Amino acid sequence: MTLVDNEMRSGSVSLLAGESPPGRRTDSVFRSAAALAAGVVLLILGLILVTTTRNAWPAFAEEGLSFVTSSTWDVAGAAFGTLAFTYGTLVISAIALLIAVPVSIGVALFVTEMVPKRLRAGVVMLIDLLSSVPSVVFGLWGILVVAPAITGVYTNISSALSGVPVLRTVFSGAPISGRSFFTAGLILAIMITPIITSITRETFATVPRAQKDAAYALGATNWEMIRGSVLPFSRSGIVAGVLLGFGRAIGETIAVALVIGSSPQITQRLFSSGDALSAVIANQFGESTGTYQAALIGMGVLLFVITLVISAFARAMIARAERRIGAESV
Amino acid sequence: MNESRIARRVSSRVALTASAAALVLAISACGGSSSDKGSPTSTTAGTKLSAATLNGSGATFPQAFYETTIAKFQTVQPDVTVTYAGGGSGKGQTDLAAGLVDWAGSDSTVKPEDAAKFKTPFLYFPTVAAPITVSFNLSGVKSLRLTPDAVAGIFGGAVSKWNDPLITATNKGVTLPATDIVVVHRADGSGTTANFTKYLTKAAPTSWTLGTDKVVNWPAGQQAGNGNAGVAQIIESTQGSIGYVDFSDADFAGLKSAAIKNKDGKFVAASLSGASAAVAGATLNADLTYDPLDAQGATSYAITAPTYMLISTTYGDTAKGNAVKGFVKYVLTDGQDLAGYSGFARLPAKILSAAIAQLKMVKVG
Amino acid sequence: MTTIDLRDGAPDLGEETRYSITRSRSGRQRQAINFLVHALFVIAFVSIVVPLALVIGYVVTRGMKVMSVSFLTDDIPIVTRAPGGGLGPAIVGTLLITGAAMLMAVPLGILGGIYLNEYGAKRRITKAIRFLAEVMTGVPSIVMGLFIYTTWVLAFGVSGFAGALALACLMLPVIIRSTEEMLRLVPIDQRQSAYALGGRRAGTIFRVVLPAAAPGIVSGVLLAVARAAGETAPLLFTILTVNAVNTDIFHGANTALSVQIFRNAQQVFPGPQERAWGAALTLLSIVFVFTLIARAVSAIFARKHQV
């Protein structure tokens, strides 16, 4: 949807610009109302940054750099280091991406290359349904069904890998309640797959037919065509999709809060409990006061800044993809 | 106005059924207790209070008790609407200080530097007390006796196996396995954690090093659940686990809990009567605050937490002021009979009468 | 599964090309790889259908156990661990809060989209706003909750309205962007003829452009609403929770289905766990209905505007 070409818009603008004077007043009123509405976005984003930072300031001032570099979260001792939470956030997002990216690209190719046109709408609808399942429903399923059931699987995996060097540590240890980095990453993967799929699918759909046909003309199989034409052409689109999924994974709260185990630690063992920025805010905000609350709001600022940077990157990538399509499809 | 009336009607309908159930349970639970002397209606319901809405917020620890009591109170005083929004002791205190609510619930006393922030002076009214259990799930083990140092060792991470000498020393005859102890604590900030760690700071000052607050710097590798029921959820489903859970949830979940060595050197299991004994063993301060943690008395349960209602000393609105006084009095009289149903211990008569007497200090109008 | 024609993805392939593929030299091996990769695509698809089916399956089977008229209308039990009771207040809360959020975000969002597409398409400020709207869609919902907490709740206390504000902030950029996209699809000649008849800009937008784009805009709005109705994080500290219906969204705590699921999922007692599944079924039904209507509307729209 984001990749619709710009032709039409520019056309309409030049037309509108040549409009005649009558009725200018109603127009200008409406125009300023619309401008104001658009400006609200600017206002809200600005306010988010200002108010949250201001409310988090006591914690930033007290902790300084150790707010991000220390992993000691000790309310009793008034030490608010968030490193262990940031670590958890990044680890579960990485797990989610490692699983979701290949699956998403596979699904997108399945839809564009294998599903007959008349069935495509139905398949896309299925993916849409998956993306519309509320996070809390995944969380409920995760905590009451997946976590208890998956401990056995984890035990099997860790005993199977007990002889393999690096993997031995990563997948070691007796999983206790099934609530762990890995479970959180798994649930997140399910949640971000539809996002990455829809962006990559849209990109794949815009690959010019000429490019594909050229590959077929050289005698390429369908896969060789995909590898040679579709994937290289769609690189920025895929990166954009991955970044958007990453941004979503980092900010996702409720499902993570339910299945991550809420026991902060920096460890390579993925089957053990951890904690994440968003989950800590959700769990601990209710009873917080003073600097403690400021620190939790500060974690919100941290999340906001991280996701801002990621989505800015993603949007830049999409813009690049759009430009490229614009250039090549003419 | 209309809407709140509808809301009230709806809630009073629930209240009827809830209170009926509550009474049945309360009577069957504390059947033989000597407390049921006066007839339930003689104490407070005498005067009918005029319409008023009392908003409250604060500690979530006694929330179940307040909600049950509110529901019952509104059947006696249908024109008074009382709300309790939870949010934590800290929130209750700041809300009352700012005049956002008419009453607050708090598990802790107001820090001296915060007391100055209150627009009007306030009073403490102790309402109920509650035992915090140390519940466990260990197959083959039915009962466990723990010293404060053993509890501190387990939760602080120094004691990591079930057959640690610190545990076996007080559990002769119980076969304890050489397996890891899975410690379960709260994921959310909580007054239960604050009281539990405050107890450890008091009773095991040398072996407990994590301090006391709503969240402490727990050792890595433990498990955590949200709310008492969340901790209970993990304990119930995890072999070899141990955690602190309020009595009402532990009791209803059917968890086994340890007997804790009290100040008199006796191992006492968590119970409402043990909590009442602990309250009786504590010294009541002039402002009616008291500390029942690690209290004296042979039958006192060591980990017993207090909780208070905070109200202002003056209410300009006569109807509201009378309603507040009426509600507090109800909590201190008939409300005490509802305590057992929600898993809280009633206060001894000595404290109750002191609290009722303190109501005279509230100026109305 | 594998009976799907692998060549179907390239339907316009000429006879000649197909012929050349099958005749190529290392054909067999390359065909095998081709087949394998396509099998992986199918596996990828299956691996997202399975969790979807599992989630829906669990929610439906567990949720149906408690589903009844009284479950949908009764109050939430005051003592959480009690069995029975219903989720009437949460359903009312979800509808009121999402509805209020919609009332705020939809007009603003549509106006904003109109501005971006109809007025300042090429101007720098418009580009900036479009970019920021896109970035705003990526703001984590818990951050929106914190934002409303710091700006509204600290000053005016919790209420359903505070929750609605947070949801509106989440919906706004989505509606702006989807409205803009839909307006872009309206063919120029429609506008041209309006102008030729002497129409003014605002009038043309209202009488010609908006009606033409309406189905697409409605679909975008419905999707945004469906997303918002399922949100939990922004409501946690803005509405708190209550057990009885609170129809006054401006005063006092409120509750929502999502919040009830979050709280009851972490309960050890069967009563609240059952209520969580029941709430999940109710919420999922609401969200799916919105999503399906949105898709149906946009499918009709797409057919109308097929290029």
Image (cartoon, coloured by chain):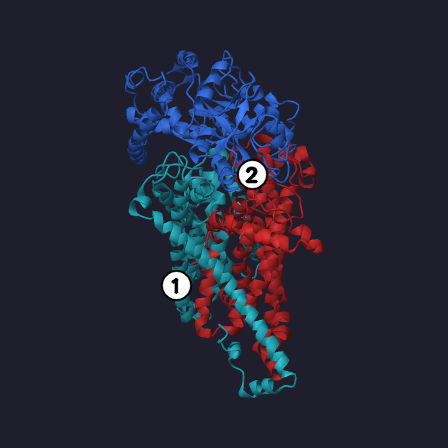
* Chain B visual colour: blue
How far apart are the alpha carbons under marks 1 and 2? 55 Å
> In this view of the protein, which residue sits in the foreground, A23 or A66?
A66
Where is residue B4, by image quadrant? top left
**Residue A172 drawn at (x, y percent):** 65, 49
User: Residue at the spot x=45%, y=42% of the render?
Assistant: C163
* Chain A visual colour: red
Residue under circle 1?
Answer: C297
- Please, which chain is the residue tagged with disc 2 on? B
- Please, which chain is the residue tagged with disc 1 on? C
Chain letter for the cyan part: C
Mark 1–mark 2 CB contact (< 8 Å): no
- Mark 2 is on which residue type? Gly
Regarding residue A17, the answer to whether it shows in the image is no
Where is residue C54, by image quadrant? bottom left
Please give left or right for residue A160 compared with residue C294 in the image: right
**Residue B195 drawn at (x, y percent):** 54, 26
User: Residue at the spot x=62%, y=58% of the render?
Assistant: A98
Where is residue C14, by image quadrant? bottom right
Q: In which quarter of the image is the N terminus of chain B?
A: top left
**Rendered image: mark on residue B240:** 2
- Mark 1 is on which residue type? Val
> In this view of the protein, which residue sits in the foreground, B248 or A309?
B248
**Residue B12 drawn at (x, y percent):** 30, 31
User: Residue at the spot x=33%, y=48% of the render?
Assistant: C67
Against B177, residue A324 (above or below) is: below
Query: Do circles 1 and 2 both sit on a common chain?
Result: no
Please give left or right for residue B78 compared with residue B99 in the image: left
Q: How crowded is mark 2: few (under 14 residues within 10 Å), some or many (20 or more)?
A: many
